[in-house]
Image (cartoon, helix red, strand yellow):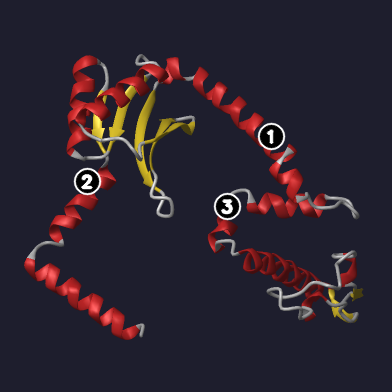
Amino acid sequence: MYQQESNVEEIVPNLSRSASIASYGRIDPFLSKPKSQQMTLKGMIKGTKNILGRYVGKWFYDKGIPFDAANSLYFSPIVSAIQRAEPGVKPPTAYELSGPILDEEVEELTKWIEEYKQSWPRIGITLMSDGWLNKVSKNEFLNFLAYSPKGTAVLSSKDASRTKKDANFYVRLYDHIVEEVGDKHVVQFITDNARACVFAGSKLIEKMKHLVWTPCAAHNIDLMLEEIGEIKIVKETLEEARCLKEIVYL
């Protein structure tokens, strides 16, 4: 079997020796210089992957990055780009990420959206409304998205925190959004099932005969489950389950 000396220093040649864990001042032993040792090529590959995983893991843990971020379609390309980078290439700084690099991403996304809009006259879009509540600031936003076979894009976001959200509000808002996008491009409009939204949707299709209004299926299911939860035997069972959960996690 081919033998070769493992030199982890080649992977992270300029690693700082002053790194600490959770700001307690303790030097992370993993970041100290490892000892060279003889190992097989298979062992080297396995060891290198483990080292990569450990460093990525430490970054995730240190900054509280959600684990499912590793499922992002951009995660593997990051690793590939790092592998292709020449020795000595430094990672982007916080300034670069929040400045020039962000500007490039905005420019690229803006260009994609403009190209995306070019397909609307040919294939049309489904316009979707999605409410979102900021649990910290208590601000409520209404997001509008466009969907077509070419993809999904967020078109706009309206702050509805200090607005009376009655039927008239939604009628005016939906009418404005459709006109802004171009009513001839909108094939379907999906909203939630609040009474005011249902009323606004019915008014919208009265005005625009070609448009189809559709209630959100997920919201429908949510409302159904809420009603099922009010059935006596179901409600009592849920309350018992909540009590049991409190005991188990004490």
Give the Cα separation between the discs numbered 3 and 1.
21 Å
Tell me the kind of residue under disc 3.
Ser
| Residue placed under numbered mark 1 in the picture | 103
Vertical relation: 222 (above or below) 28: above
Residue 202 in the image: state x and y as whole percent.
Answer: 18, 25
Mark 2 Cα-neighbour bin, 10 Å: few <14, some 14–19, many ≥20: some
Mark 1 or mark 2: which is in front?
1
Q: In which quadrant is the N terminus drawn? A: bottom right
Q: Are marks 2 and 3 in contact (CB under 8 Å)?
A: no
Of all residues shown, which one is farthest toward the left?
Answer: 232
Vertical relation: 171 (above or below) 229: above
Vertical relation: 217 (above or below) 4: above
Mark 3 or mark 1: which is in front?
1
Residue 175 in the image: state x and y as whole percent.
Answer: 30, 21
Residue 209 visible? The answer is no
| Residue placed under numbered mark 3 in the picture | 72
Give the Cα separation between the discs numbered 2 and 3.
29 Å
Q: Is residue 49 left or right of residue 7?
A: left
Q: In which quadrant is the C terminus drawn? A: bottom left
Q: Earlier in the sequence, mark 3 or mark 1?
A: 3
Mark 2 or mark 3: which is in front?
2
SS for dot 2: helix
Residue 88 in the image: state x and y as whole percent.
Answer: 91, 54
